[in-house]
Amino acid sequence: MSTPVLVKASVTTDLERKAFVFPVASNTAHVVLKAKIQHPLTSVTLCLRFYTDLTRVYSLFSYASKRHSNEFLLVAQKPNQYKFHLGSAELIFNVPDTLSTKTLGKHVCVSWESSTGLVELWVNGQPLVRKSLAKGHSIQPEASIVLGQEQDSFGGSFDINQCFMGEISDVYMWGRVLDPDEVVLAWYNQALPDYLINWRSLNYTTKGYAVVKPALLSVHTAG
């Protein structure tokens, strides 16, 4: 008999200085986010802060649609390598040693725009070289958005070997590309307009062993 997954009612709250904690490896613990997305996205920026000692592959942000389970997916391949998916397209960013830190905590922002296909990845307020992916593509608005697991189908099919362990905080998403000054402001957790996902007013549901606690990682300790 399978173990039932504990589901808490959806709430909307200000999570500033709080974090979602995923203390053990599992294929059940996750957080479902609700976003105000009504139309296909042709530009987007995602920022979040995370704290982990994992060295294997793990999902940071999983946005699935009925069209594709990897509609918008950010994965850490290893401590200084990230993979970004848009549907069936993907690319890898390698963080150079000059931007690497020994801290277990990081702040990452990824942005993409359809008109040029340009993708930007920022780590702790520092940009990597721009790359190109899925020019002319659009991100479907009917979304299942999950933290803590990678969706291999819409809303499920989790793999324990891809789960996140640690804490995630300061998750924000915009339907536009942030300019460089705004990315630095996001790193410092300053308010910016036009949120699709707003950590300070977050609509979420926790499922399984995922706990909201005061964040160990803050803007002062990331990077």
Image (cartoon, rainbow, N blue to C red):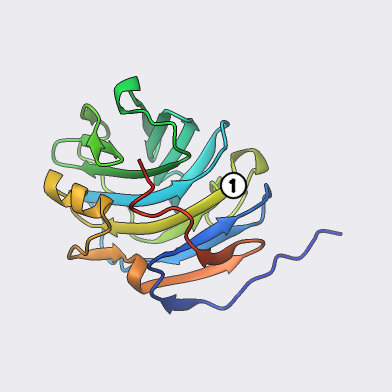
Rendered position, 105 above or below 91: below
Rendered position, 52 above or below 204: above
Rendered position, 109 above or below 3: above
Q: Which of 51 and 163 is in front in this view?
A: 51
Question: Residue at the top extreme?
Answer: 97
Q: Where is residue 87 in the image (x, y as percent from the top left)?
A: 39, 40
Kindly identify the residue that appears in the image at 35 percent across and 26 percent down: 95
Residue 66 in view (yes/no): no
Using residue 16 as the reference point, say whether residue 133 is left or right of it.
left
Kindly identify the residue that appears in the image at 45 percent across and 48 percent down: 50
Label 1's element?
A: loop
Q: Position of residue 172 (x, y in %)?
A: 32, 58
Question: Residue at the right extreme?
Answer: 1
Q: Where is residue 40 in the image (x, y as percent from the top left)?
A: 26, 56
* Quadrant where the image shows the C terminus: top left
Amino acid marked by disc 1? Met
- Report the residue marked by disc 1: 165
* Quadrant where the image shows the N terminus: bottom right
Kindly identify the residue that appears in the image at 29 percent across and 42 percent down: 110
Kindly identify the residue that appears in the image at 57 percent across and 78 percent down: 9
Q: Which of 140 and 21 is in front in this view?
A: 21
Q: Which of 33 and 66 is in front in this view?
A: 33
